[in-house]
Image (cartoon, rainbow, N blue to C red):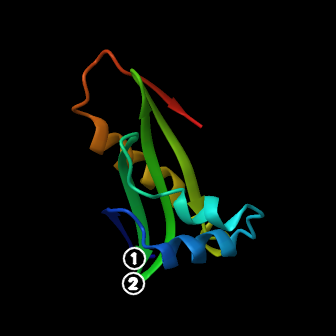
Amino acid sequence: MNIQYINKEPSKMEIYEIMDSIQAEMDEDIAMNIFEPNDEMVTTVCAYHFDKIVGMGRVIKENNTLYIQDIIIKPEYKGEEIENNIIVNLFKQINDFPSNFSLYIL
């Protein structure tokens, strides 16, 4: 399967599409703001199959701690190693962070 990984924030429509695909029961305002750029967000990676988003994940920071979180994959793409590849791409993005940061995967 040809999956492309891009370091970018997803559009609001892409977020809605992903959240809807996993039937996330969360407040629409939270769903729409979950990937909104802010001071805590370090990087985001989106996975695309052709031009359709199929997954995403992000790294946020809080003080001297980095968190890999919000790894979301469309159900029909589970088992395609997309989760692992998003995490690998996120690690590549944060590789140059100072060593005094702790890293957690949520």
Can residue 41 be spotted in the picture?
Answer: yes
Residue 18 falls in image quadrant:
bottom right
Residue linked to disc 1? 2
- Looking at the image, residue 52 sits to the left or right of residue 95; the answer is right
Q: Quadrant of the C terminus?
A: top right
Of 97 and 1, the residue lying toward us = 97
What percent of the width, then of the height, locates residue 16?
59, 74
Residue at the (73%, 61%) spot, across then down: 26
Q: Is residue 4 above or below residue 63?
A: below
| Residue at 21% from the left image edge and 32% from the top image edge | 96
- Check the image and report above or below for 71 versus 24: above
- Residue 33: assigned label: none
Do residues under tags 1 and 2 come within 8 Å of each other at their CB atoms?
yes
Q: Amino acid at mark 1?
A: Asn
Tell me how far mark 1 sits from mark 2, CA to CA: 7 Å
Which residue occupies the extreme left position in the image?
96
Q: Mark 1: give few (<14), some (14-19) or many (20+) Cα within 10 Å.
A: few
Residue 20, x across and y down, in percent: 68, 75
Quarter in which the N terminus is drawn: bottom left
Q: Residue 77 appears in which quarter of the rendering? A: bottom right
Query: Which residue occupies the foreground of this view, 23 or 82?
Result: 23
Farthest front residue? Answer: 29
Residue drawn at x 26%, y 29% as measured from the top left = 97
Q: Position of residue 69 (x, y in %)?
A: 54, 44
- Residue that badge 2 annotates: 50
Type of amino acid under label 2: Phe
Classify mark 2: residues with Cα within 10 Å, few (<14), some (14-19) or many (20+).
few
Rendered position, 19 above or below 66 = below
Nearer-N-terminus badge (1/2): 1
**Tag 1's secondary structure?**
loop
Q: Residue 80, located in which quarter of the rendered image?
A: bottom right
Q: Secondary structure at mark 2?
A: loop
